[in-house]
Image (cartoon, grey):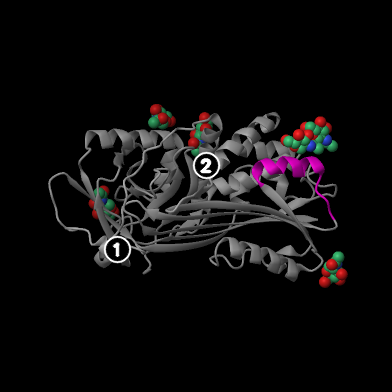
Amino acid sequence: MNFYIAFCVLVSCAFSVDSAIINTKTNLNSELSNKIGNFSVDFIGRTLASEAPNANLIFSPITLWTVLGVIAEGAAGRTLKQVCDVLRIKPEDRPNVRATFRTIQKYLVVTTSTVELKKLNIMFVDKKLSPKKNFSNISSAYDVSFAPLNFSAPQQTADFVNQRVNAFTKGRITELVNSKDLLQSHMILTSALYFKGQWTYKFDESSTTLRPFYDSNGNKMGEVNMMTNRHTFPFANIGAIQARVLELPYGKENRLSLLIMLPYPNVSVKDMFNNLHNYSLDMMFGDIATSVKEFPDDEIIVYLPRFKIESELDLTGSLMAMGVRDLFDDTQADLSDMVNVPTYVSKISHKAIIEVTEEGTTASAATSAIFGNRIGSTRFEVNRPFGFMIVEKTTNTIAFSGSYNKPQLY
Ligand SMILES: *[C@@H]1O[C@H](CO)[C@@H](O)[C@H](O)[C@H]1NC(C)=O
Ligand SMILES: *[C@@H]1O[C@H](CO)[C@@H](O)[C@H](O)[C@H]1NC(C)=O
Ligand SMILES: *[C@@H]1O[C@H](CO)[C@@H](O)[C@H](O)[C@H]1NC(C)=O
Ligand SMILES: *[C@@H]1O[C@H](CO)[C@@H](O)[C@H](O)[C@H]1NC(C)=O
Ligand SMILES: *[C@@H]1O[C@H](CO)[C@@H](O)[C@H](O)[C@H]1NC(C)=O
Ligand SMILES: *[C@@H]1O[C@H](CO)[C@@H](O)[C@H](O)[C@H]1NC(C)=O
């Protein structure tokens, strides 16, 4: 029988709020968060490599890590070994990983007036099957809940799953699973992450203008609605990854930020992300902090396209390229710690949406002299392909990542 994994991810970054940042950075820097970071960067590279070079993409490395963590708890033999290798953990370390991950996950739930980050992990299981007790128990460490369904009625099952996801994402993701994918299937693991954040420093909607967007080599590709803002945003020029990086914080807590990574001219987004193999997020935040210390009063004049990206990805290929093979092979997969019947994973699909806008700015937003120029100001003009990451800074978790290569009017 097969096992279908669908997960969806939604990011909506709209609205803005004017407030001082309360600096509460307590670094929860565990060995595990470094491993997750290492996994995430590898996964980003593979996914960019397997998609069309001009695509706009969004995906959630941490959500995939969570899904694989749950699978590892139900796997045995070579399947377990392959999944653990990709997770950068040892099978015997799973109890420790579980405990640490529980702590990391706590930081991935945020509910304040300005930032909302929440997750939903559900395993829908055919009523005829019962997951093993230990597996159900252990999965609770990953916040997975179980829902029994009648898989003999695929359309009804798909509708039910889609309704849950639809409600969770507030109507943004309406069709995560398709009844055709569920034929012969008896389990669906869904994992969804929802993020909505208000900018700490707002963009003024009335300053948004149509502007050209170029390819990496400077040829005009089209136009975008370019938002603009100026502030002493954290910023660094990072030679090691051949990019300039700007941090746009959300909310008041200084915990979640959008990092815009703008490659040097003639450097592709893919190559820039590949440079991250040799350069950790810690180092990036370190370089940003150093740069802020050196130029504390420098204003950054930001030009950033208003954008929305929707991605639907089949991650099976990326995972196989990373070494997870047996899991997808009906003759080799060993999920014997999960259920009593032979099971393999038929597909891992992923849906994600991100919206980045200036919307919600109140009338009092009219910022002064947006286009003024003064000594000590730097232009950060995002008018060519760029990469981005939404990072939870306490744990250095890459909640979402992606690339914007093709201009669109949004
Ligand atoms: C389930 O988990 C709880 C708490 O982790 C533990 O005390 C209990 O022994 C576990 N039960 C089984 C059947 O493993
Ligand atoms: C369930 O977990 C407990 C505690 O980790 C272990 O002692 C027991 O052998 C497990 N049972 C099965 C059937 O795997
Ligand atoms: C499950 O769905 C099938 C097909 O619609 C139906 O024949 C069967 O009675 C249902 N079983 C249960 C337990 O609801
Ligand atoms: C980028 O490439 C174009 C065309 O290949 C070239 O004309 C331009 O000088 C290059 N720019 C930089 C900064 O290297
Ligand atoms: C992950 O860690 C290994 C071993 O430390 C290193 O060789 C590799 O380059 C790292 N990969 C990424 C993507 O950071
Ligand atoms: C990157 O890797 C090269 C060798 O591959 C090494 O010499 C260099 O120190 C590394 N850079 C960083 C920032 O780790």
Q: Is residue 159 above or below residue 134?
A: below
Tag 2: amino acid: Tyr
Along the line of sight, which residue is nearer the eye, 322 or 279?
A: 279
Magenta region, main secondary structure:
helix
Give the image location of residue 223, x and y in percent. 31, 68
Query: Which quarter holds ligand 3?
Result: bottom right
Q: Which residue is mark 1?
A: 226
Q: Which residue is mark 2?
A: 107
Give the image location of residue 293, x and y in percent. 26, 33
Look at 36% across and 64% down and name the residue there: 360
Give the image location of residue 387, x and y in percent. 40, 51
Q: How many marks?
A: 2
Residue 94 in view? yes
Within 10 Å of disc 2 (Cα), the crowding (few <14, some 14-19, many 20+) is some
**Residue 335 as seen in the image, left or right of residue 247:** right
Residue 32, magenta (yes or no): no
Which labelled disc corresponds to residue 340? none
Q: CA distance from mark 2 to mark 1?
A: 32 Å
**Residue 347 as seen in the image, left or right of residue 363:** right
Boundaries of the magenta span: 129-143
Look at 41% across and 36% down and name the residue there: 25
